[in-house]
Image: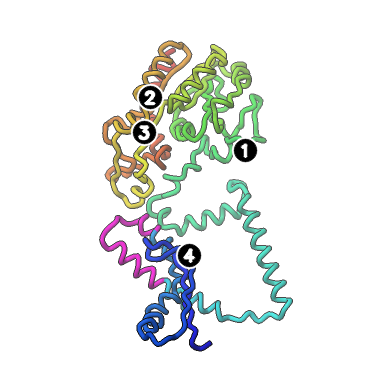
Amino acid sequence: MDDIKTLIFRTDRLGDFIISCPFILSYKKNTKKMINSIVENRLIIFIGNISYSFYLWHLPIIYFYDLYYLDSLFRIPFLFFLTLLLSYISYIAVENKFRYTQIKFKTPFRNITLSIVFLLSIFLINYFAYQEGHNNKIKRWLKDLIYNVNYLENKINFSERTDFYKININNNKVYDFCTESSDYSEINSDSLRINCLKNEKNKNGILYIHGDSLTAHFIPMFNELNINEAIYYSHKTKPLSKIDFKHLNKLRKSYNEVTFVTNINNLNSLTKLIDIKDKFNPNIKILILGPTPRPSKNLDSIKCFIKNINCSYDTLEDEKQRNLFLLNSKIKLLADNNFNIFYFNAYKSICPKKICYVFNKEKNLITHMDGSHLSLEGSILMKKNFITFYNNKFKSN
């Protein structure tokens, strides 16, 4: 067996310097010295030894490099040598160390101990994974600990500005309290979730906001408003198919005015609203929140924010691609012909010009979390225009 040599390689994509499948190269010494010299080459053996560490390191290194740095000619050689260095260190300090370390437990005590540790770990991971973060002290403590040492948190207040799940109403996160699956044990006499209600004691009127994530990104704006009406949010998937008309009509007994608020961003959702509009009590107002800008799919606002570079998009291309000219004209026609339907054109509040930014370096302003959803500060950009609309068109009728 001395003349049999085996090299084991575990690798990933060739484009990232390695191929994604393990393979074994076996050979028997022969008289062809060239083959022997290639296979027994120290460099080849070295690469074979560190290949698994290389496989583990290369993707996180590539990911974080592309997250923080711009592309350049130095990208590939830098990534290769950094991955090579870390792979060698982990091969020597971790892989080899644990490979040849003997756990000095006698069987079956060793197997029993390892099994207990394994099962306990699985149990604890699953237990904490399914705990609601806002109710679990340990989960909150771990999150705060990570945030305190996180570079992006300390430098640019990253999660507060980009985490969609931090959207809140009256300091209560809507994705914790206002979704279909949320615990709604705290409800008031009007069957409204208290955690999803702002200005609860104000009975002058209520803005009943009902929708999915494309309605939810309007909530930061509503949360900033200082108006003489209660504001309530109900999060639903397929929202226009899940309207409780009976509940809305019943709210008229407690509030002088009830307004149903939702986002309409395409012709299909507009058609659906038109089909059901007659089911609303004529005394209930309908407020349509129009579509918001959607940057091109290859524009990553979060990466632009982290790299602190200007990233812009063309609104004319967006409006043409989504057929927004026709959509806006149809919504406006609907509002003009129905005394109880109102339309807030949100698009120009975010982007009044032809060219706009998902991240503006000079203003340090990020308007989008992704290609469809506004950031918290992007939503608040609409506040000024909405107040003007609210006072001049909505409340004057």
- The residue that mark 2 highlights is 345
Where is residue 330? Give x, y as percent.
40, 18
Instruction: Point out which mark residue 41 bears.
Output: none
Residue 67 covered by magenta stretch: yes
Query: Label 1, on which residue?
Result: 181
Spatial CA distance of label 1 from label 4 is 41 Å
Residue 231 seen in the current view = no
Q: Which residue is labeled 3 in the image?
A: 293
Answer with mark 2 or mark 1, whichever residue precedes in sequence: 1
User: Residue 142 magenta-drawn?
Assistant: no
Q: What element carries label 3?
A: loop
Nearer to us in this view, 172 or 72: 72
Disc 2/disc 1 C-alpha distance (Å):
31 Å
Residue 267 in view: yes
Mark sitting earlier along the chain (2/3)? 3
Kind of residue indicated by mark 4: Cys
Position of residue 259 in the picture relative to residue 116 (left or right): left
Do the residues bearing badges 4 and 3 touch, measured as CB atoms within 8 Å? no
Q: Earlier in the sequence, mark 4 or mark 3?
A: 4
At which x and y percent is residue 185? 67, 35
User: Mark 1 belongs to which amino acid?
Assistant: Ser
